[in-house]
Amino acid sequence: MVAISLYSLVNTFWVARLGYQAVAAITAVLPFFFLTVAVAVGTGVGINAFSSRKFGEKDSEAPNLAAGQALFLSVILGLLFALISNIFPDQILRLSGATQEVMDLAEGYLRAIGLGMPTFFFSLIIRNVFHASGDTSVQWFLRSLLKF
């Protein structure tokens, strides 16, 4: 969460050079961005808890299945949020309190953020699968996918 907050802070620092409308635009997108972070982190923590418990029980099959399902789930959630951000940008921004003055800038930023959602969800969810296993090597992940 610190890294994500720092991302927003650095983003604001650089965008501030473009003017107050640009800062207002990225501020209007922040609630949607934090919603996606909450869904991705919450899903990852749930998968982490399940996999850790199964590893502790010496059940090696259930965490392998969970890793495959986590991959599928991260792709589905990433695509869902990418579609939502690109199909309903006006509604999302109005709910966030964006004014008409910054709507065009905010919509462009929201669409750009939306394009990265599949990768964003993948990285946050799969990271928790690695943490649950205690083995953060790529070989464990690849073995799990082959069993899926």
Image (cartoon, rainbow, N blue to C red):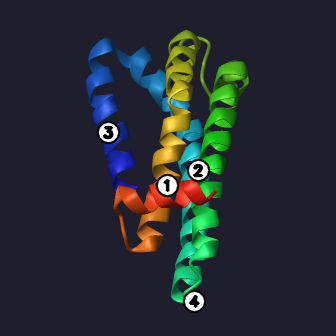
Q: Which of marks 1 and 4 is nearer the N terminus?
A: 4
What's the CA distance linking mark 2 and mark 1?
A: 7 Å
Circle nearer the N terminus (2, 1): 2
61 and 73: which is toward the camera: 61
Q: For mark 4, what is the residue?
A: 57
Residue 1 appears in which quarter of the rendering?
A: bottom left
Residue positioned 59% across, 83% down in the render: 59
Indicate which disc residue 1 carries. none
Kindly identify which residue carries mark 1.
Answer: 126
Within 10 Å of disc 1 (Cα), the crowding (few <14, some 14-19, many 20+) is many
Marks 2 and 1: CB-CB under 8 Å? yes
Query: Quick one: SS at disc 1?
Result: helix
Q: Which residue is drawn at 31% across and 45% down?
A: 6
Q: Residues within 10 Å of mark 2 (few under 14, many from 20)?
A: some
- Residue beneath disc 3: 9
- Lower sequence index among marks 3 and 2: 3
Disc 2 versus disc 4: distance between alpha carbons?
Answer: 23 Å
Whether residues under marks 3 and 2 lie with C-beta atoms below 8 angstroms apart, the answer is no
Mark 1 or 3, which is nearer the eye?
Answer: 1
Q: Name the residue under label 2.
A: 71
Residue 35 in sight? yes
Check the image and report above or below for 94 versus 80. above
